[in-house]
Image (cartoon, helix red, strand yellow):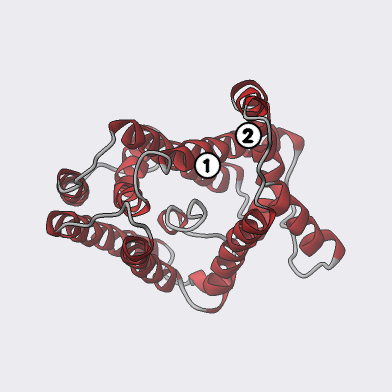
Amino acid sequence: MIFSSVLCFLLTKVLKIVKVEEGMTLEIYVTSVIPIGAMFAMTLWLGNTAYLYISVAFAQMLKAIMPVAVFILGVAAGLEMMSCRMLLIMSIISFGVLVASYGELNINWIGVVYQMGGVVGEALRLIFMELLVKRKGIKLNPISLMYYVSPCSAICLFVPWIFLEKSKMEGNGTWNFHFVVLTLNSLCTFALNLSVFLVISHTSALTIRVAGVVKDWVVVLVSALLFADTKLTIINLFGYAIAIAGVAAYNNHKLKKEASKVPSETPADGDSIPLVSQAYTNTER
């Protein structure tokens, strides 16, 4: 998050490659941006902790439940309307994730709980972002979003780290920072957000959603090849395929809904990332 903050500052204030949207006030920052940053930090902390207990492929499968969490919280916040069609889609996604979980050979429920906590944190972040756009009237592209959110997330991660992890690191005697690995990870994270901004600017929301589904499958399959602890089963893949089919139906439904609401406005303006597509971008590391 510190790395992202510095790069965003360089891009927006020094090099001025990307323009930061105007309209941000202290009141909006405190009531909207800080909650978004806190939820982002929660997502990163719990989601990354889950990898200590479950495989990358299985964690990716569990993330397919994201639209369900977003929809339920959206209904509670008054942003979504309950319908039979949406209930069917949510049921398909949930059923697919359950089947994928049932097919997991070495399931660790501690890891599942951490991952589900990360999913809830990400869903809350997306809800707060939609509230920021709809009620505050501010639309942020990915770089502007990271410019405002990254410093807040860094602080939200730093404070609990002091109390929960710093003593453990000191107890181990040495702090083993893999500088090259951490730098490459940070660059990949930043490049991800930048690529989303460029794709949205030059293509459409549909492109990023389709690319997100393809990326999910690539992560699952490649991680199975790279990591020895990943054992995919037919039930795993079958359940994940069901969940992804539900996600595709959800994306299609949302795109049609957005098109019917604003027929003259195209997503190629790059003003903001659609709610669900963000669920498959910013949190992927």
Q: Amino acid at mark 2?
A: Leu
The residue furthest bottom is 202
Q: Secondary structure at mark 2?
A: helix
* In this view, 124 is above or below 194: above
* Earlier sequence position, callout 1 versus callout 2: 1
Q: Nearer the viewer, residue 167 or 235?
A: 167
Q: Nearer the viewer, residue 181 or 68?
A: 181
> Which quarter of the picture shows residue 195?
bottom right
* In this view, 267 is above or below 179: below
Q: Position of residue 128 (x, y in %)?
A: 52, 39
Residue 232 relative to residue 149: left or right: left
Q: Which residue is mark 1?
A: 44
Q: Nearer the viewer, residue 120 or 138?
A: 120
Q: Position of residue 264 (x, y in %)?
A: 47, 72
Q: Which residue is mark 2?
A: 157
Residue at 34% in and 43% down: 54
- For disc 1, the neighbor class at 10 Å (few under 14, some 14 to 19, many from 20) is many
Residue at 57% in and 43% down: 132
Q: Are marks 1 and 2 in contact (CB under 8 Å)?
A: yes
Q: Position of residue 283 (x, y in %)?
A: 49, 51
Q: Nearer the viewer, residue 210 or 284?
A: 284
Q: Position of residue 99 (x, y in %)?
A: 14, 48
